[in-house]
Image (cartoon, rainbow, N blue to C red):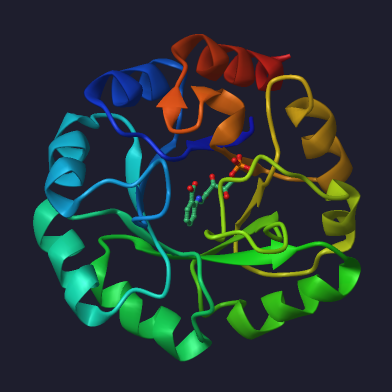
Amino acid sequence: MTDIKFCGLKTGRDVAAAEQAGARWTGYVFFEKSPRHVSPSLAGELAHLAKTSETVAVTVNPDDDLLARIRDAMHPDWIQLHGSETPQRVVQARAYAKRGVIKALPVAEAADLDAAKAFDRIADMILFDAKPPKGADRPGGHGTGYDYALLKSLQISVPWLLSGGLDATNVSAAVAAAGAGAVDVSSGIESAPGVKDAAKMQAFAAALAV
Ligand SMILES: O=C(O)c1ccccc1NCC(=O)[C@H](O)[C@H](O)COP(=O)(O)O
């Protein structure tokens, strides 16, 4: 079974649809330039609706004040760090989550995987995402992929997620190419930027079930 993280949820309907499709994790993005941005108070309401999924607060170089506001509002299971955070910052961020920290790392070529060594056994999970396009104003959620087979020879001790440009049409092949046990998706389950689509969530999960 491949575990699924549906990221960038903004409404109660999104949370219900994600859980209906079998998501293990539901992600909430705290980044104002993102079409998926939510405030801590909205995330608190959404997290309250999450019954079967573990909640993930997705942040970019967050300061302690933001982490504290997120913790107080939604008590996230996981904090995802999607910026240029150091291993030391990963350790500090753990205090704000119930379960642990997911460190996102950008991948375009094999050499990018070297960064994972510094976070192995420091982060609780690692998420390998596509490197953002040049000039992008946010580090994730672009719907772009890379050569997923680069991950096949990965040797790290902590669980990891495959991410970047996945959708119902390519996720099965991507999982096989990367040898992934878990996947993350945002754009591939949307009908427009920031607008989640329940049918696409179902199709994504169904593509992994065959
Ligand atoms: O989704 C965003 O807009 C976003 C903004 C800032 C930081 C992270 C963001 N997304 C993080 C994710 O975990 C996405 O699911 C991941 O980048 C994959 O996105 P996609 O290629 O669109 O499936």
* Quarter in which the C terminus is drawn: top right
Q: How many numbered markers are drawn?
A: 0
- Give the residue displayed 61% in from the left and 28% down from the top: 188
Front one among 106 and 176: 106
Quadrant for residue 46, please give it: top left
Front one among 188 and 76: 188
Question: Height in image: 15 above or below 13?
Answer: below
Front one among 19 and 121: 19
Q: Residue furthest front?
A: 135
- Give the residue displayed 67% in from the left and 58% down from the top: 132
Quadrant for residue 166, please give it: top right
Q: In the rendered view, does 156 fall on the left or right side of 62?
A: right
Q: Residue furthest top?
A: 199
> Residue 49's spot in the image, x, y percent?
18, 29
Quadrant for residue 27, please give it: top left
Q: In the rendered view, does 7 fall on the left or right side of 66?
A: right
Question: Height in image: 48 above or below 142?
Answer: above
> Residue 115's spot in the image, x, y percent?
71, 79
- Give the residue displayed 41% in from the left and 75% down from the top: 61
> Residue 99's spot in the image, x, y percent?
33, 60
Q: Residue furthest bottom?
A: 88
* Quarter in which the N terminus is drawn: top right
- Give the residue displayed 45% in from the left and 90% down from the top: 88
Q: In the rendered view, does 134 fall on the left or right side of 176?
A: left
Question: Height in image: 81 above or below 43?
Answer: below
Q: In the rendered view, does 2 fall on the left or right side of 171?
A: left
